[in-house]
């Protein structure tokens, strides 16, 4: 095939032009990995690279294929994202069909069906009252937009002194600077960024839920009869009252604090936050980037208690893990408030806003989710995780094992090290332990057998034990 006299096959190939000359596939992989270490930055890692990355060449269903031919079950869903698996025929077709129409047009002055339909679906699926959708190209950006919506809301209503944000400790909301200011102050290294990050108001981390722990389990099912901690509720009430005059918004990860330690809390605290926010005239943001679209057993974490936040951030699973897209939804109250100001527009825009290819895949992914039995799948995975992780309770050095929806966590009394990920890989499973945690976020199409293998790999990783010669800090 030719286009303007050019050989389409030749120019479309993404392989290194020299690849055919390199006969030895192993040598070629080694060369790629050396280039990776020299030039390619990986998340939260030094440069040049010091880790051994695994080179992925293909992925299908729940399995990743490595350059050396090994196959791994992806226990991470590419980080809360690829719940329908790789090379999903429905998503592949949505992508190809949209590519055959157009892939992107600017969103200022132009609009298109994939974005309109996606916004309509999101309004339909999310808690009642969230009406308006701002499309972003990544999660951190959607948090920036959420914060900006709230700040602008108060500015527009003549209360620009309300410009601090309250959150609880152990949070994670993205790696951009304003998002970092509401991440955990210790983990986010706020001290070393002093003067650069806005100083926000912090509550202690919410008390951990006990019903999700397998140490307390007597049956395969979870119980939902917890009590909120009255002392914590009192601290919430006092802190919010004390800072109400300067608070624009409260932002939290509802039900699951992921990067802050895969900690689960009782959804009842969300209702307390809603009531306190209303009482003190503060806006409430739920960052459901990780929890959205079923992972916790409800479509959104907010649904556990039927609470509507003023602003909600979505991402990760939104496109079934195919591409980067996030969205910030808000209520009519927030949009109306912004419109009443001297500056009646939301001051935000992005070149690739509402990318059509991405929106088309998101529509297909949400269609699969809603028309399929995500609830049954997540409940089935929860049971399989509770079964498969039970024996981890008795492994030396394990302090807790907990399961919520399609999230399984083993907490250790010692830091993880690379031998643990290696043990998982030796068991045919891709995991990414961090801190003192070995955890999984399996794709919803995992079979019970896949989940049993993931659990066995997690137990094997936990059984590696503490590093006898830990690197000096
Ligand atoms: C992943 C995540 C983000 C950041 O999303 P990116 O797409 O990585 O920028 C923000 N908040 C929460 C709760 C997340 O899990």
Image (tube, rainbow, N blue to C red):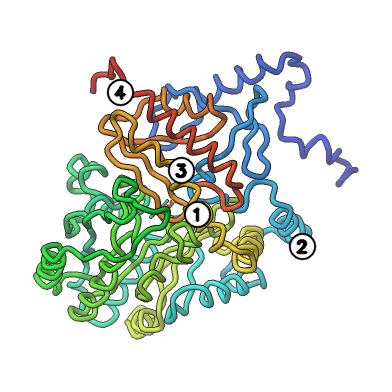
Q: Secondary structure at mark 1?
A: helix
Quadrant of the rendering where the N terminus is positioned: top right
Crowdedness of circle 4 by 10 Å Cα count: few (<14), some, many (20+)?
Answer: some
Residue in view at x 40 percent, y 35 percent: 433
The response on whether ligand 1 sits within 8 Å of label 1 is yes
Of the numbered discs 2 and 4, the one sitting upstream in the chain is 2
- Closer to the camera in the image, 112 or 261: 261
For disc 3, the marked residue is 440
Quadrant of the rendering where the C terminus is positioned: top left
The tag on residue 101 is 2
Q: Give the CA separation, mark 2 to mark 4.
A: 54 Å
Q: Give the CA separation, mark 2 to mark 3.
A: 37 Å
- Disc 4 and disc 1 in contact, CB within 8 angstroms: no
Residue 131 versus residue 408 in the image, above or below? below
Q: Nearer the viewer, mark 4 or mark 1?
A: 4
- Disc 3 and disc 4 in contact, CB within 8 angstroms: no
Residue 393 versus residue 244 in the image, above or below? above
Horizontal arrangement in the rendering, residue 230 relative to residue 350 (left or right):
left
Q: Is residue 105 visible?
A: no
For disc 1, the marked residue is 316
- Disc 2 and disc 3 in contact, CB within 8 angstroms: no
The response on whether ligand 1 sits within 8 Å of label 2 is no
- Disc 3 and disc 1 in contact, CB within 8 angstroms: no
Q: Secondary structure at mark 3?
A: strand
Q: Position of residue 86 (x, y in %)?
A: 65, 46
Q: Position of residue 253 (x, y in %)?
A: 33, 59
The tag on residue 466 is 4
- Closer to the camera in the image, 83 or 124: 83
Q: Give the CA separation, mark 3 to mark 1.
A: 15 Å
Crowdedness of circle 1 by 10 Å Cα count: few (<14), some, many (20+)?
Answer: many
The response on whether ligand 1 sits within 8 Å of label 4 is no
Of the numbered discs 3 and 4, the one sitting upstream in the chain is 3
């Amino acid at each position: 095939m030719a286009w303007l006299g050019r050989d389409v096959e030749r120019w479309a190939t993404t392989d290194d032009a020299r690849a055919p000359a390199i006969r030895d596939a192993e040598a070629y992989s080694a060369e790629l990995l050396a280039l990776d270490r020299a030039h390619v930055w990986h998340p939260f890692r030094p440069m040049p690279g010091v880790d051994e990355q695994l080179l992925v060449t293909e992925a299908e269903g729940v399995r990743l294929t490595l350059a050396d031919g090994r196959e791994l079950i992806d226990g991470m869903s590419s980080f809360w994202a690829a719940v329908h698996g790789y090379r999903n025929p429905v998503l592949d077709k949505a992508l190809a069909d949209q590519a055959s129409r157009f892939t992107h047009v600017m969103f200022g002055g132009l609009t298109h069906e994939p974005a309109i339909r996606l916004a309509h679906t999101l309004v339909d699926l999310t808690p009642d009252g969230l009406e308006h959708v701002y499309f972003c190209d990544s999660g951190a950006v959607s948090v920036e937009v959420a914060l900006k919506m709230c700040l602008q809301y108060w500015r527009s209503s003549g209360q620009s002194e309300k410009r601090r944000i309250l959150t609880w400790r152990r949070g994670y909301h993205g790696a951009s600077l304003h998002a970092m200011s509401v991440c955990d102050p210790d983990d986010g290294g706020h001290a070393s960024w002093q003067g650069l990050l806005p100083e926000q108001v912090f509550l202690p981390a919410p008390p951990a839920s006990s019903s999700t722990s397998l140490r307390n389990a007597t049956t395969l099912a979870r119980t939902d009869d917890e009590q909120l901690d009255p002392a914590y509720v009192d601290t919430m009430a006092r802190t919010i009252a004390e800072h109400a005059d300067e608070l624009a918004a409260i932002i939290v990860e509802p039900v699951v604090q992921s990067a802050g330690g895969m900690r689960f809390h009782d959804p009842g605290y969300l209702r307390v936050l809603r009531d306190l926010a209303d009482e003190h005239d503060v806006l409430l943001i739920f960052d459901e980037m990780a929890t959205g679209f079923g992972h916790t057993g409800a479509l959104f974490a907010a649904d556990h208690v039927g609470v509507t936040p003023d602003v909600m951030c979505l991402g990760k699973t939104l496109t079934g893990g195919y591409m980067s897209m996030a969205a910030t939804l808000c209520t009519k109250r927030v949009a109306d408030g912004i419109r009443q100001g001297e500056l009646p527009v939301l001051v935000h825009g992005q070149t690739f806003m509402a990318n059509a290819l991405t929106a088309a895949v998101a529509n297909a992914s949400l269609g699969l989710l809603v028309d399929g039995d995500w609830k049954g799948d997540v409940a089935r995975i929860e049971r399989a995780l509770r079964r498969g992780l039970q024996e981890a309770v008795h492994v030396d050095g394990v302090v807790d094992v907990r399961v919520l929806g399609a999230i399984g966590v083993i907490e250790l009394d010692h830091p993880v090290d690379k031998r643990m990920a290696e043990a998982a890989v030796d068991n045919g499973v891709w995991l990414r332990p961090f801190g003192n945690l070995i955890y999984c976020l399996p794709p919803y199409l995992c079979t019970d057998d896949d989940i049993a293998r993931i659990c066995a790999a997690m137990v094997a990783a936990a059984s590696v034990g503490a590093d006898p010669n830990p690197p000096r800090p």
